[in-house]
Amino acid sequence: MRKLKKLLSFWTLSILFVIIFISFLKVIKSDMKLAHQGIFIYQKPFSWIKYNLRTSFKTSYSKLFNKYKEIGLPPRLLYVNSQYEKKLLSETPNSTKNWVRAKIYYNNKLKNIRMRYGGDNPFNWLLEKKRIRIKSNKLDLFRTTRYLEYFPFDVKNFFSHSILSSAGLTSTNVGLVELYINGVSKGIYHEKNVLNEGFIRRKKLMPVNVYKGENHAAEKILMVNPNLFENPSLWNKISIFNQLQDNDKSDLKFFLKELNSYNAKEKFDVTLGNFIDLNKFSLHQAYYILTQNYNQLWFHNMRLVIDPWKGQVDFIEIDPFISDQIGSKFQFDIHSNDLITYLSQSSEFNDLKYKKLWKFVSEEKILSKVFKKVDDNTQNILISSSRDPELNKKKIRLEINKIKKMLLGNEKIIKEKLKTKPKTFWTNTNDYFVFQIEDITPASNLELEFNGNLPKWIALDLNNNKIAEENEILKFKFRNSKILIPTTLFSNRVKTTTKLNNMNQVGEIKAIKTRFNFITEKNLKPTKVKVKNKFSNQIFIVEKIKKVNASLPNKYNVPLGDIFQFDKLNETKILSGNIIINDDMVYETNIQILPGTIFHIAPRKNIIFRKKVEAIGTDSRPIIFKTSSKKKNDNWGTIALVGKNTRGSTLEKIKYYGGSGGQFKQYRFTSALSIHNTGKILIKDNKFYKSNFFDDVIHVVYGDKIILDNIEITNSIGDGIDIDVSTDISILNSKFINPGNDGIDFMESTGTVKNNYIDNAGDKGISIGENSNINIENNYFHNNKIAIAIKDRSVSKVKKSKFTNNTVHISAYPKNWRYAGGGNIKVLDSKFVSKEKNIFEEFQNSNIEFENSIFIGEKSFLEKKMKISKK
C-alpha cells in the first residue's frame, strides 16, 4: 500500500511538474515575443500566469453555467479553422498579417470572408482577445463596406468616440459588438471601419489622397528627421487621388512646404493660404481640450486628408483617448504637432476654438448626450462582459463612473476658466492709452469712459510708430460719455520648452502679458475702462495700474472683429472694360463685373474668386472670357468660385470662349467654369464655346443650392456639366449639343433636371451614379448613345420627357462594387420613339419601371425582362 502511494505521488508530482514546466515554457515563449517582437515598443512587466488563470477560469465558468443565454450587445459570429488560427501565429509578427479563410454570420447571412490580425504591438495578437481585421468578397459587402476591424473594448475609447460623433467629427467607429469565435465568446469589441477609399466615399468626400503619418514602433525609420511635418517621406498613402500617380506626393510636399514657410513669413495667414478650414479645425481642438487628448502627435497617429477640390486639409482622428490633464496640468492650447501648434498661436483660431468649446459645454451639452448613449448601452455591455475573458463587470461600472467624473471635471474647469474675469489692466502714457491682457481668457467690447470731450477718432498703433495711420483708425460707437470698441483681444501665445532637442514639438504654449497701444484724437485719455466676458456676458471694471510691462502683439495676435474703418478686404471692387490676365489672378475681395467687360486671359492661366461675385451682363453687352492667344487650342485655364465666402454669387449673361482647367497651388480644376465648396449660386444665360483638354465645361463639387439656368454648351470635349458630391442642384432650360462624353454627369448628388434639350451625346445624355437621387422632368433626349444611365444605388424619377432615336434610351446597372447595388428608375408620362427598336438595359440589382408611357417602335429589353405597369 505504501509502495502504491509512493508510486502515485511520484507520477502525480511528475505530471504536475511536466504541466508546470510546459506552462513555464509557454510563458517564457509568450514573454519573449511580447518583449522582443514589438519593434521600438517598451513593454511593462506582464503577469502571464495570473492572466492565463483568470481568462481560462472566466471562459470555463461562462460555458459551465450557461452564461450564453442572455443576449447583450449585437453578436458577430466568426468561424475560422483552428489550423488557420495557428497559421496566423506560426511566424509572428509577419504571419499575423497573412489573410486566411473564415466565415462570419452578419445581418442574418453567413458570408465567406478573409481574416487576419492587426497592429504591430504584440499585445494585439498574443492575448486571448486579439485585434482582428476582416474583408468580404467585393460582391458581398457588409452593407456598403468591404473591410471591418474589431478592437478589444476600451471604456475610454468608447467615450471618446462618442464625443467625436456628437461633435460632428469623422470617426471610424461603427459601434460595440460581442464577438464569438467558433461559438466561444471573446467578449466586447469595437467594430470599426478601415480607413481607405471606401471609407472616404461613404463620408461624402471626393476621391482624394489620405496619408498615414507614422514614425513609431515597427514603422519607425532611423537616421532621418523624425518629424512628420518636416519629412514627406515618412507618410504613406492609404487612399489614392485617382488623377495622380500612386507614388505622387506633390500635394503633401506643397502643404508641408507652406506650413514650414509661413512661420518665417512676416505676414501671418492663419488659413495657410486657405489650406485650413478654421471651423473644422476649431472643432478638432475643442474636442482635444474637452478630452485632454494629445494623441495626434508629430511622429505618430496622424491621418491627413488633402482635398484638391476644396484646397484644404483635414485630420481623421484615430486611437482617441481621455485624460484630465496633459503633462502636469489642464491644457487649453494644445501643442502636439506642428500644425496644431501653428494654429494655437493665432487669436483668430483661438477665438473660434473657445466658442466651439463653450458651445460644447454650455449650449449643446455634449457630455449629456454622450452619457445618455453610454447609459443606453451599459446594461448590454455588462451582460456581454460577463462572458468576456478579460473584463470584469464590477470594474467596468467603476471605470464608466470614473470617466464620467473625469469628463465632468474637465467641463467644470472649462466653464470656470472661460467665464472668469479677464485678467486685464490699463494705464495712460504720454503717447498712448495702453490696455494689457494676461492669461487665456479674452476680453471683449472695450468700454472707455471720458471726462469732458470725447475723441472723434481712436487708432490702434499696429506698427508701434506712435502715429495714427489710416489703416489703424477704428470703428466705434458713442454711448453717452463713453466709447464702445466692438473687438475681442487675446494675449500672445508663445511656444515654450525645456528640451534641447525636438524643441518645436515638445513643450507647451503659454499665454503671456500683452499690451495694445491706442492713440486718441487730441491725446484725450479715458478715466475708466470696462470689458466684457463674451461667454458669461458679464461686464468687469478694468484695474488701472501705474506702469505696463508687457509684450506688443506678435504677428499671430490680431484684434478681432470688423473694427478698422479702412478695411480693403471688405470693399467691393468693380471690374470693367478690357482686363488683361497674364498670370493667375486671385480676387480676395467682393467683386462686381460690369456689362461689356472682356477678360483676355493668357494660356493656362486662371481667375479665382474667393468672395462674392456679381457678374451681370446684358444681351447687347455680355461679359466675355476669352483667350489672349491667337494659337489654336491655346486655352486659358478656369474661372473658379472657391469657398464658402463666394456664397450668393451671380453669373449672368456671360460668354466663355476657350477654357479647360488646370492646377493652381493646392487646387485641381477640370473645367472652364469651376464651382467648388460653395452654394446659393445663380448661373444664368451662360454660353460656352471651344472648351479643350480637361473633362468638363462646368464642374460643381461640394456645392449646394446651385441653379444653372439657360446654359448652352456646344461641342464639349468631355462632359457638359459634372456634378460631384453636391445637394439641391437645379439644371433648367438648357441645351447640350454634341457633348463628347455626357451631357450631365451626377455623382453622390441630389438635384433636378428640367426643361433641357440633350442632343448627340457621345456617351450618356444624363449619367446618374454613385448614390445620387435626381428628378428629371420635361426633358428631350435625341440621338444619344444612351439617353439616361443610372447606376450604383442611385434613384431617379423621370416625368413628361421625350426620347427619340437614342441607341439605348435607359440603362440601369451596377458599376462600382463599393456601392453594392445598381440603379432604380421610374418613368412616368413619357414618350419613346425609335426608327427601329426602343432599347432599354436592366442589369443585376437594378430596376426600370414605366407608368403611363408611350412607345412608338418595337419595344426591346436587354438582360432581363422588366415589369411594366398596366396603368
Image (cartoon, grey):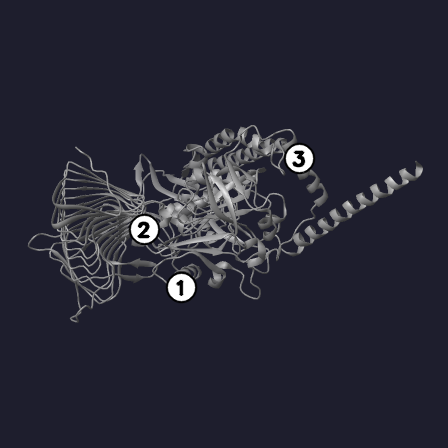
Q: Nearer the viewer, residue 338 or 669?
A: 669
Residue 91 at x, y percent in the picture: 62, 57
Q: Is residue 224 above or below residue 755?
A: below
Q: Residues within 10 Å of mark 2 (few under 14, many from 20)?
A: some
| Label 1 Cα neighbours within 10 Å, binned few <14 / some 14-19 / many ≥20 | few
Q: Which residue is mark 2?
A: 815
Q: Earlier in the sequence, mark 3 or mark 1?
A: 3
Name the residue at 53% across, 29% down: 71
- Name which residue type carries label 3: Ser
Residue 153, x across and y down, in percent: 56, 40
Horizontal and vertical percent for residue 564?
A: 31, 48
Q: Residue at x 80, y 44 (%)?
A: 15
Q: Is residue 1 left or right of residue 516?
A: right
Which SS class for mark 1? loop
Looking at this view, is 593 or 572 the one in front?
Answer: 593
Q: Nearer the viewer, mark 3 or mark 1?
A: 3
| Mark found first going from the N terminus, 1 or 2 | 1
How many C-alpha atoms fall within 10 Å of the one at disc 3: few (<14), some, or many (≥20)? few
Q: Amino acid at mark 2?
A: Lys
Mark 1 → mark 2, Cα distance in angstroms? 27 Å
Specify whether 45 is left or right of 519. right
| Quarter containing the N terminus | top right
Q: Which mark is residue 418?
A: none
Q: Which residue is mark 1?
A: 248
Which residue is more in the foreground, 657 or 783?
783
Residue type at mark 1 is Asp
Q: Is residue 627 left or right of residue 318?
A: left
Quadrant of the rendered image containing residue 9: top right
Is residue 662 visible from the viewing direction of this image?
Answer: yes
What residue did someone put label 3 on? 60
